[in-house]
Image (cartoon, rainbow, N blue to C red):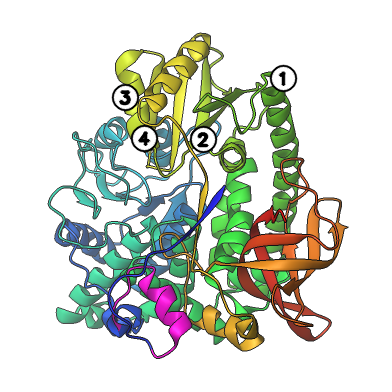
């Protein structure tokens, strides 16, 4: 692990020197780029909007059955909830949703989910956060016999998605996806929930312009009521926070802090021990998102979406408690799987210094819904592209894998390259940093070998790097600085929260739960200016032992610790190395 100070671009523009360095280190060169007013949102100019709007208008004015087919992660859940609530606010009377079972049906618009959809007698099927690669699923929709007309081909299909579009697009009546060829929408990193939100914006503007709200005898809906869902899904899906996404997240957080939040989100955060008046984007990613994702990993995401849509306080609280319990179960399963995977790697003599450039682990007892999280943890520990495999419920001769990668390796492209050298990959998909695949079980060793060869041809060494914003003066380690940095967000993917570096003397230390390192530190060169620090999951056998009197080089972010009504500065350690005298 090495520390690297970010390069700043442009000339100073901010009157606060610390914020100026932080912003310019993230490519920000003017105040306009950190103006998060709603007026700065991009207009809804995605390709396919007009055709999609016509489908929705026809369905609403003819009281057709609209069925939303979602996904089993937080982005899919929030996109589904946005779709259901938004369409109802626009006048739709018959809106329902369906989410595939991760283990039995797999991801997206498959022929199997279309069979289940047919039981709902839909007139219009809308996908959210999926569908752009569903050639077979779209074909199955076109074969459905409409319950309304008795004819095949009369069930309409509208695909909304944000994933990269393949060369062969599915046959749909409309496709809205900023990543399809020819789409002028400049923010290509918008989440699936954002695509659905923008479609509703377009439909609302069309209805207002043409007097359709008056014909429906309804008032124009306030689309801002969906922004708590939008902000949550955007952060939880770990999409890049470009300016437009930062506006969406900032405005959602602002409304939540002001009390404009649905019961489900409020109770999910409260059972996690949070205070909504102080919620940040980080809380979406580490408190609320995992609790929603847990039900998609271990059970049925229908519960998660229902929790987000529920308006009854008691029912929403009960569902939030259920999701919280599932999240605890998920953590236990994940911990056991990580221990098993590390033991396997130990038996293989695989260490962080191994010459192999990839990590592949298979275990038939692993839970299919959690293998992605295990891959993420192993990737962090060993800093190599990592894939974790387990058996599937449906095919004995297949195993399913979930992979995570490092910045130097585009995982989906590597899997595409692997597929050119072997027929063992049955299907795959994903992004640069995360991907999923299914391979033939008997050819696991072949896959491992070719995967290693393809990655090794791209890099011969991988070293984890933490980009920092440099040293921060000890007199700035204050509550005011902490709050200033919180207010300067939202922080997230590709717009990371500030991380600083510095040298400290360990004044005292103790272990919490035998794994978290709690320290009192004194900045070297000062006297009596102690500050608390915590390093979560420090004691895993891979890091140096720390004792009182040690001098350490630390990479850390700043946080506010609240305990029994008292607030204090706390450093959140990201990396620690001993200074040799």
Confirm or deny contact between disc 3 and disc 2 (CB under 8 A): no
- Residue 243 position, x and y percent, is 32, 71
* Image quadrant where residue 282 sits: bottom right
Few, some or many C-alpha atoms within 10 Å of disc 1 (few <14, some 14-19, many ≥20)? few
Marked residue nearer the N-terminal end (3 or 4): 4
- Residue 292 position, x and y percent, is 59, 56
Dot 4 falls on a residue whose secondary structure is helix
Please give left or right for residue 252 compared with residue 204 in the image: right
Please give left or right for residue 294 compared with residue 64 in the image: right
Mark 1 — residue? Answer: 347
* Image quadrant where residue 474 sits: bottom right
Residue 227 visible in this rendered orientation of the protein: yes
Residue name at image x 59 percent, y 69 percent? 265
Please give left or right for residue 362 compared with residue 429 in the image: right
Residue name at image x 71 percent, y 50 percent? 326
Mark 4 — residue? Answer: 412
- Find residue 384 and name its label: 2
Marked residue nearer the N-terminal end (2 or 1): 1
- Find residue 417 and name its label: 3
Dot 1 falls on a residue whose secondary structure is helix
Marked residue nearer the N-terminal end (1 or 4): 1
Is 191 a magenta residue?
Answer: no
| Residue numbers of the magenta segment | 15-30
Dot 2 falls on a residue whose secondary structure is loop
Closer mark to the observer between disc 3 and disc 2: 2
């Amino acid at each position: 692990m090495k520390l690297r100070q970010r390069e700043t671009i442009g000339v100073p523009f901010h009157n606060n020197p610390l914020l100026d360095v932080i912003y310019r280190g993230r490519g920000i060169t003017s105040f306009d780029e950190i103006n998060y007013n709603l007026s700065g949102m991009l207009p809804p100019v995605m390709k396919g909007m007009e055709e999609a709007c016509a489908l929705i208008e026809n369905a609403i004015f003819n009281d057709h059955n609209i069925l939303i087919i979602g996904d089993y992660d937080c982005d899919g859940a929030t996109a589904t909830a946005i779709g259901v609530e938004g369409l109802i606010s626009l006048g739709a009377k018959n809106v329902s949703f369906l989410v595939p079972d991760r283990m039995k049906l797999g991801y997206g618009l498959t022929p199997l989910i279309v069979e289940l959809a047919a039981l709902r007698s839909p007139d219009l099927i809308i996908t959210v956060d999926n569908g752009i690669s569903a050639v077979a699923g779209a074909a199955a929709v076109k074969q459905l016999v409409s319950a309304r007309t008795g004819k095949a081909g009369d069930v309409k299909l509208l695909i909304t998605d944000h994933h990269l579009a393949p060369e062969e697009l599915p046959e749909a009546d409309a496709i809205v996806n900023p990543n399809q060829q020819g789409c002028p929408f400049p923010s290509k990193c918008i989440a699936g929930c954002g695509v659905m939100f923008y479609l509703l914006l377009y439909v609302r503007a069309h209805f207002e312009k043409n007097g359709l709200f008056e014909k429906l005898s309804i008032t124009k809906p306030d689309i801002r009521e969906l922004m708590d869902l939008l902000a949550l899904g955007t952060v939880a899906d770990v999409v890049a926070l470009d300016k437009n996404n930062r506006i969406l997240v900032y405005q959602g957080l602002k409304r939540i802090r002001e009390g404009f939040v649905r019961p489900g989100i409020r109770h999910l955060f409260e059972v996690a021990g949070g205070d909504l008046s102080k919620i940040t984007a980080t809380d979406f990613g580490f408190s609320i998102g995992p609790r929603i994702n847990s039900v998609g990993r271990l059970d049925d995401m229908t519960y998660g979406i229902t929790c987000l849509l529920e308006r009854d306080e008691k029912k929403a609280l009960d569902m939030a408690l259920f999701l919280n319990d599932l999240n605890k179960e998920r953590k236990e399963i994940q911990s056991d799987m990580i221990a098993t995977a590390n033991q396997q790697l130990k038996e293989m003599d695989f260490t962080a210094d191994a010459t192999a450039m990839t990590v592949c682990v298979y275990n038939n007892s692993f839970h299919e819904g959690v293998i992605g999280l295990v891959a993420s943890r192993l990737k962090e520990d060993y800093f190599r592209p990592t894939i974790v495999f387990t058996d599937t419920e449906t095919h004995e001769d297949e195993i399913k894998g979930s992979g995570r990668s490092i910045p130097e390796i585009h995982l989906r492209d590597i899997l595409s390259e692997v597929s050119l050298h072997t027929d063992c990959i049955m299907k795959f998909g994903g992004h640069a940093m995360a991907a999923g695949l299914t391979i033939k079980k008997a050819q696991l060793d072949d896959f491992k070998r070719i995967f290693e060869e393809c990655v090794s041809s791209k890099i011969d060494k991988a070293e984890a790097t933490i980009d920092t914003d440099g040293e921060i003066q000890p007199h700035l380690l204050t509550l005011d600085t902490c709050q200033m940095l919180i207010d300067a967000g939202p922080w997230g993917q590709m717009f990371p929260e500030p991380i600083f570096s510095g040298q400290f003397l360990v004044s005292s230390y103790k272990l919490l739960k035998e794994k978290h390192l709690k320290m009192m530190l004194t900045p070297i060169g000062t006297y009596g200016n102690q500050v608390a620090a915590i390093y979560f999951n420090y004691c895993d056998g891979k890091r140096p032992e720390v004792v009182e009197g040690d001098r350490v080089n630390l990479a850390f972010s700043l946080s506010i610790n609240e305990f029994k009504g008292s607030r204090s500065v706390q450093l959140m350690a990201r990396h620690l190395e001993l200074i040799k005298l």
